[in-house]
Image: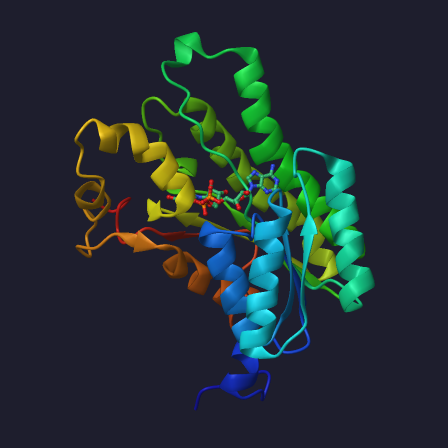
């Protein structure tokens, strides 16, 4: 006989009803898909983005579609005061904070590492590393009844690639933040987990690929070279993030889940 430790039905374990979430970088790409799935799963969501009007448009759409409270707030994760304001906004507007998705990030191409300037490295690390750390810290301060913090790492947080050394460095740090903060936040009943996507078709990736596309590269064909024979979509990652936010993932803590259709496998 299989021991049922909680006695809770599966539908309840999958549900995010009553949870209050913030998704940084939620106006588009993986963040927008994540906000959508979180709301569908029952959560009330604050979409926080540099692009406040994009965030507001999505919040209005989701609220009409699912009949749940959603809101939008401007945030620049490179500015800690702005992260604090976004976290406070969630507590004020939704009455608390249970889930924080550290999704916002940037991935400008570094070019040869030997030419990387300190300004470039500072900017990238400030957004991707300090922004993630500060997001987790400010969220944890406001999670008065436990919670979940989900960090967007990358397969480049495990395996390097040429031309993107600063990004690779930043995503290795996100893996480190996930472990380090799991040690400290676990005793506060706050799970800290990461997701490491392989290449996913998002507005940011399209923008980055534009020069290669203009030079004749079949970007769609390159993106679909996975072991599953198709390219990754934002919702492929949103589903993993949503799962990690639920109590189905109650025993996942301090780990980074790779979601890459096998790209690290071979
Ligand atoms: N798309 C991929 O292939 C891929 C792969 C691995 C990891 N990731 C990670 O997933 C996350 C999302 O990637 P995406 O491809 O959906 O990105 P995207 O560029 O398509 O969208 C990013 C969103 O974040 C917002 N944003 C950017 N800088 C911000 C800041 N300083 N403060 C607040 N918001 C900001 C943007 O306005 C935008 O809405 C990033 O952390 C990225 O590193 C993406």
Relative horizontal placement of residue 133, taking residue 262 as reference (left or right): right
Q: Is residue 259 above or below residue 161?
A: below
Residue 17 at x, y = what percent?
63, 78
Which one is in front, 214 or 234? Answer: 214
Q: Is residue 90 above or below residue 166?
A: below
Color style of the picture: rainbow
Figure quadrant of the N terminus:
bottom left
Tell me which residue sits at (20%, 57%) in the image. Answer: 228
Q: Quadrant of residue 44?
A: bottom right
**Camera-side residue: 240 or 85?**
85
Instruction: Say whether residue 243 is visible.
Output: yes
Q: Measuring from the top left, give residue 79's x and y in whole percent.
A: 71, 34
Number of on-image labels: 0
Q: Please name the residue shown 60% across and 54% down the image.
A: 55
Q: Nearer the viewer, residue 107 or 67?
A: 67
Q: Residue at x 39, y 25 (%)?
A: 164
Image position of 199 (left or right of 185): left
Q: Position of residue 9 (x, y in %)?
A: 53, 88
Q: Quadrant of residue 15?
A: bottom right
User: As rendered, which of 4 and 148 lies closer to the eye?
Assistant: 148
Position of the C terminus, as image quadrant, is top left
Residue lying furthest top: 115
* Residue 105: percent from left, percent from top: 53, 39
Q: Answer whether residue 149 is visible to the viewer in this image.
A: no
């Amino acid at each position: 006989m299989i021991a049922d430790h909680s006695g809770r039905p599966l539908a309840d374990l999958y549900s995010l009803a009553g949870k209050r979430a913030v998704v940084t970088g939620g106006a588009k790409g993986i963040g927008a898909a994540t906000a959508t799935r979180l709301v569908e799963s029952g959560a009330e969501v604050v979409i926080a983005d540099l692009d406040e009007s994009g965030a507001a448009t999505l919040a209005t759409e989701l609220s009409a579609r699912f009949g749940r409270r959603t809101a939008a707030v401007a945030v620049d994760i490179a500015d800690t005061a702005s992260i604090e304001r976004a976290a406070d906004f969630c507590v004020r507007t939704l009455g608390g904070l249970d889930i924080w998705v550290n999704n916002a990030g940037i991935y400008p191409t570094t070019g040869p590492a030997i030419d990387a300037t300190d300004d470039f490295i500072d900017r990238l690390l400030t957004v991707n590393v300090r922004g993630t750390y500060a997001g987790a810290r400010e969220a944890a301060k406001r999670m008065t009844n436990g919670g979940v913090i989900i960090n967007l790492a990358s397969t480049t947080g495990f395996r390097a690639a040429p031309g993107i050394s600063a990004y690779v460095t930043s995503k290795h740090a996100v893996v480190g933040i996930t472990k380090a903060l799991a040690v400290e936040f676990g005793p506060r009943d706050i799970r800290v987990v990461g997701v490491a996507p392989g290449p996913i078709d998002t507005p940011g990736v399209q923008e980055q690929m534009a020069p290669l596309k203009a030079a004749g590269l079949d970007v769609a064909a390159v993106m679909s070279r996975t072991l599953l024979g198709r390219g990754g979509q934002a919702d492929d990652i949103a589903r993993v993030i949503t799962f990690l936010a639920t109590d189905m993932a109650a025993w996942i803590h301090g780990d980074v889940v790779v979601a890459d259709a096998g790209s690290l496998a071979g």
